[in-house]
Amino acid sequence: MSLDPTVIAIPVYFLLIGLELIAHRYQSIKSYRLNDAITNINCGVTSQVTGAFLKVLSIGVYTYIFEQFRLARISNSALTWVIAFIAYDFFYYWAHRMSHEVNLFWGGHSVHHQSEEYNLSVALRQSSTQTIWTFIFYSPMALAGFDPLVLLSVSGFNLLYQFWIHTESINRLPKWFEAVFNTPSHHRVHHARNPKYIDKNHGGTFIVWDRLFGTFKQEEERPTYGITKNLNSWNPVWANVSHYSDMWKEIRTIPKASDKVRYLFNKPGWLPDYMGGYRAPYDVDLKTYKKFDLSGAKSVNIYVFAQYLVLLAGTALFLFNLEAFENNLVQKAVLALIIIVSTVSFGAMFEGRKWASVIEVARLIAVAASLIYFFPAIGEENLVLIGILSYTMLSIIWVALLRKSIVHPVTIQV
């Protein structure tokens, strides 16, 4: 079983999301939309699944530096863990800050900021590529001699801490607490697209780094959430590549090679002066601003939600049993791909894509085929085999009945 605290905490995440949803319904607060919340979680699903492969890079490099170049070896103890936790948060601050201030790095981190809502499901909206750009920031800990297992532990608990601050249910906390720790109020500022809030409050657990290095901003009024160029999609794969796509289009228009390099490492929005210069963020007009809310018909939403529960169960089993796939990379890759395609299919159904029903039927067949092929014991259990085939056929029939509804999504003004 995986020892990653963020994986172990998955049931708690969903319990707290459910409690927040119930509380907001009781208080008549509209903070959740099915399409947005599922897309948030889908980004988390794709992040965890791709992380099963990318962690080989990040942890592998850290371990190599630790084994070959460490200046000392720090013995593991409770005090070591506390020091490592504080040190990790310090380096997290700089990795996080650079993810906002370097265009290339923002391509990875922007995924976390794309939702126009602010609730606990947003905490799960994680990038699949960010670790490629930021894992090197923690190498000083390897040089200092912190064990890779300690790094894994403190990084997991740092991410766990940040879950609860993604909420509007908690207003301000005692001054002494907000002076030291990151809080929902501080982090709402961080997720805002209001110009005065952008690139503020980068700390993970501790807000003291922002106070020390000049990036702290107090919450003054309710923020407008999201990014300056809305994603306008429920596709989690597109969410992960959209900024890189925009970068590719723009960098091709820049004539000078030196400016192409500067474009990669300057702030998002930068262009050479002869092309207009820096494009500063702007305040949205709340009187005319409308959130993206393209949604499937009610019957389609019911289907997606039902299938999504099955996907979440399957993803949890995949993540909790990663060790079982270590000797079969093909099996691991195919199952990961099916999970990612599933998230794309659900997004396509919300958006009413013409190809949504085709990819969904293909997905259902692929799920059944992969289960039977990779787990031969299933074929020996007649009831289980019959159950899988029956579920697949009934789902395909359900999709066929919904085909016309799928291609007629509803745009809801929010």
Image (cartoon, helix red, strand yellow):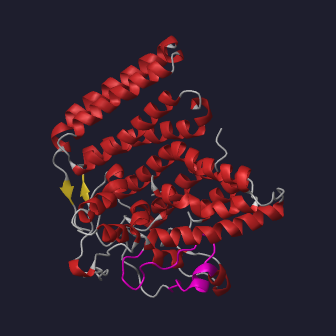
Residue 19 or residue 351, whichever sits in front: 351
Quadrant position of the C terminus in the picture: bottom left
Q: Position of residue 230 (x, y in %)?
A: 29, 66
Q: What is the chief secondary structure element of the magenta stretch?
A: loop
Residue 69, compared with residue 218, is above or below; it is above
Q: Is residue 197 magenta?
A: yes
Numbered range of the magenta stretch = 192-218
Quarter containing the N terminus: top right
- Residue 356 in sight here: yes
- 239 horizontally vs 160: left or right: left
| Residue 92 point in image, percent of width and height | 59, 67
Give the farthest residue toward the front: 257
Residue 374 in the image, given as x and y percentages of width and height: 49, 22
Q: Is residue 305 magenta?
A: no
In the image, residue 317 sits, relative to residue 331, either above or below, namely below
Q: State the residue at coordinates (45%, 54%).
A: 129
